[in-house]
Image (cartoon, helix red, strand yellow):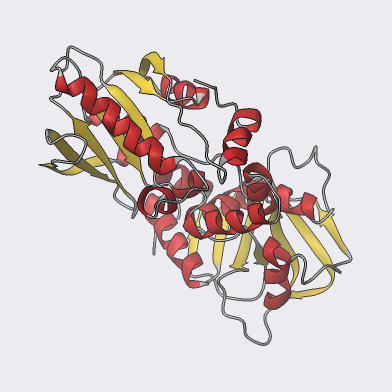
Amino acid sequence: MSDTNGPRAVALALDALRHGWAIRVEGEGGALDLLPAETAFVQPGIYAARMLISAARAATLKLANQRDAAVPETPVLIHGAEPFSLHAARALADPALDLLHPMRGPFRAEPVAAYQAASAALDLARLAGILPAFLVSAGVEPAATVTPAALAAFKDPQSLSIQARARLPVMACDAAEIVAFRARDDLREHVALIIGAQNGDRPPLVRLHSECLTGDILGSLKCDCGPQLDAALARMAEEARDGAGWGVLLYLRQEGRGIGLINKLRAYELQDQGFDTVDANERLGLPNEARDFPVAARMLDLLGVSAVRLLTNNPAKVASLESVGVTVLERVPHELPANPHNARYLATKRDRSGHLLG
């Protein structure tokens, strides 16, 4: 029998959610048997009287006010006049279907007795990269059981360790080394690229860069991720060329500010409908910022780096690193010009997410 309080239980639960299987989440206040609305196989006879969604999604559906939805990932239980089928649950969960299903309900929100379990379930959905919506007690045997304690253990960055390192000449600098990190139960493999010769006497120039497939690889103009990555490597290489400096790029596998690739693309679709990046995430029922910066601090610690010059315009990155023991000696501005496709995105980062201009 699996340990419901260990990180392995979370790995099993995430696998179950991606396959569309039910899970049980146990916490203070009670347990919840949950079937993921997005991935579960649609079949006759699967109904539930209640659904678990996020406060942000509930506010979109007029089931919670904006004050209640101030923390977008807060759990909300809703009860329908008729039991929810999986088809109905998906239509309720996916904002891309809002215009196709404008008449909904009547629904009502209920108190969440098993609040701890419900909160953990929404976080599990985000980690699995699926929409945060579940049928509650749909009569399907759970494939995995997990607790909030297990989720905390799974997210503990201390489980991260160095697995491999090798010389890796790159276009920006041929004197570079790549270091790969992995946690025991997490499939994500983060990497660090060390530019120049590591010098323990001089704090490195450090960039925390979260994975962006569309920007880093495909050259998307909707964001500034690709140009930011290239500019950071060029800046580090410039310091390394004179022999006095060096740099560390931490490439973190947390696509879409931690909501996953598919949900990020769903947010893109909503942006094309007129929503900004913050509102798009919240309409999906997801947090605007879910990146795991403590894992970056753990990577730096494993590299023997305790003080950095941080290349960023985001004060939250500075605060996050300092809160877990990394000394940020300097915030080095990192700003690139906008293009017609990402000007609104950059303005939203500045106006709603607290990014600085230079």
Q: Can residue 3 be seen in this view?
A: no
**Residue extending furthest toward the front:** 340
Q: Which residue is drawn at 48% across and 70% down?
A: 143
Q: Can residue 56 be seen in this view?
A: yes
Q: Residue at x 50, y 26 (%)?
A: 314
Q: Seen in the image, is 191 located left or right of residue 26?
A: left
Quadrant of the snapshot with the N terminus: bottom left
Q: Seen in the image, is 123 located left or right of residue 303?
A: right
Residue 262 percent coordinates (x, y): 51, 60
Give the mark count.
Answer: 0
Residue 91 percent coordinates (x, y): 71, 70
Q: Seen in the image, is 81 located left or right of residue 239?
A: right
Q: In this view, does 249 lie above or below 219?
A: above
Q: Residue at x 59, y 40 (%)?
A: 345
Instruction: Tell which of 211 and 214 is nearer to you.
Output: 214
Residue 9 percent coordinates (x, y): 42, 57
Instruction: Tell which of 78 and 195 is nearer to you.
Output: 195
Instruction: Tell which of 232 and 156 is nearer to you.
Output: 232
Q: Which residue is drawn at 45% across and 38% down?
A: 292
